[in-house]
Amino acid sequence: MSRGHLVLLGLLLVAVSTALGVFVRDEAPALDVRLNAYEPLHTRPLTVVAEWISFVLSPGLATIALLGLAVRSWLGKDFLVFRLGVLLGLCWATVLVRYAYRRVRPIDFPKWSYPSGHVTAVTALAFTAVVACAWYARRWVRTAAVLAVTAVALTAASRVVLSMHWFTDTAGAVSAVVGVGLLAGLALGLVRPGVISGRDRT
């Protein structure tokens, strides 16, 4: 995929997330309502598993990773690690748009719903991890991508099962993070043909 195609894809994903946020902020669509009201999805065995997933795959992971990248780049004077930290931070910062949408959650909770904070943090970390893998261990990129998608899917499902978020909160989070990640990655020189080929590590 060319640079131009990646830019278009990034812009499209950001636009989709923005449009979805505007569409759902005042009234939950039928899909959200049906999933939230579907009782088998919220039974005790599933909620216990979802609680553990939400505990393990949480914004705390992104916090630890961001701090680790900051310390590593400072101690090692490694500009590549610094850029990865900036990428993670920019992707994660997309959660701040929730203050513009101000969407109410399915349950009584003192934070806005769209986009999901958990899903935003885990997707930001997963995206950054795949990009880092493309630089440091290219042969493991596919494995990293599979693990990343799995982690994001589990996190999204757990938030819906726990009724902490509407389904569209999770979809909008993924769309925004990947879109911003592609655009920021291109601007930072982290996502480009040289990385994919493994020839450029400047």
Image (tube, rainbow, N blue to C red):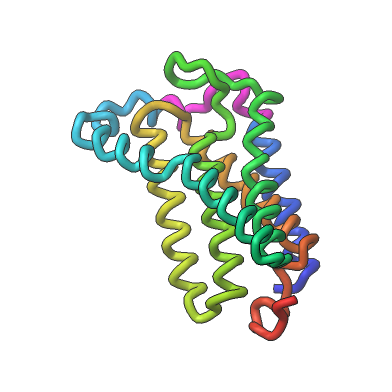
Which range of residues does the magenta coloring cover?
22-33
Could you tell me residue 169's position as x and y percent? 53, 34
In the rendered image, the vertical position of residue 146 relative to residue 154, given as above or below: below
In the rendered image, the vertical position of residue 93 relative to residue 128, given as above or below: above
Q: Nearer the viewer, residue 143 or 43?
A: 143
Q: Nearer the viewer, residue 34 or 100?
A: 100
Residue 49 falls inside the magenta stretch: no
Could you tell me residue 187's position as x and y percent? 80, 60
In the rendered image, the vertical position of residue 88 relative to residue 130, given as above or below: above
Q: Residue furthest front?
A: 75
Q: Nearer the viewer, residue 115 or 35?
A: 115
Q: Quadrant of residue 160?
A: top left
In this figure, what is the number of numbered marks? 0
Could you tell me residue 29's position as x and y percent? 52, 27
Left or right, 168 with reference to 98? left
Q: Pick the quarter of the image with the N terminus.
A: bottom right
Left or right, 49 with reference to 27? left
In the rendered image, the vertical position of residue 155 relative to residue 198, given as above or below: above
Taking the spot 71% from the left edge, 65% from the top edge, the residue there is: 77
Taking the spot 43% from the left edge, 25% from the top edge, the residue there is: 33
Left or right, 96 with reference to 163? right
Q: Pick the quarter of the image with the C terminus.
A: bottom right
Could you tell me residue 55's position as x and y percent? 36, 38
Q: Quadrant of residue 23?
A: top right
Taking the spot 44% from the left edge, 41% from the top edge, the residue there is: 58
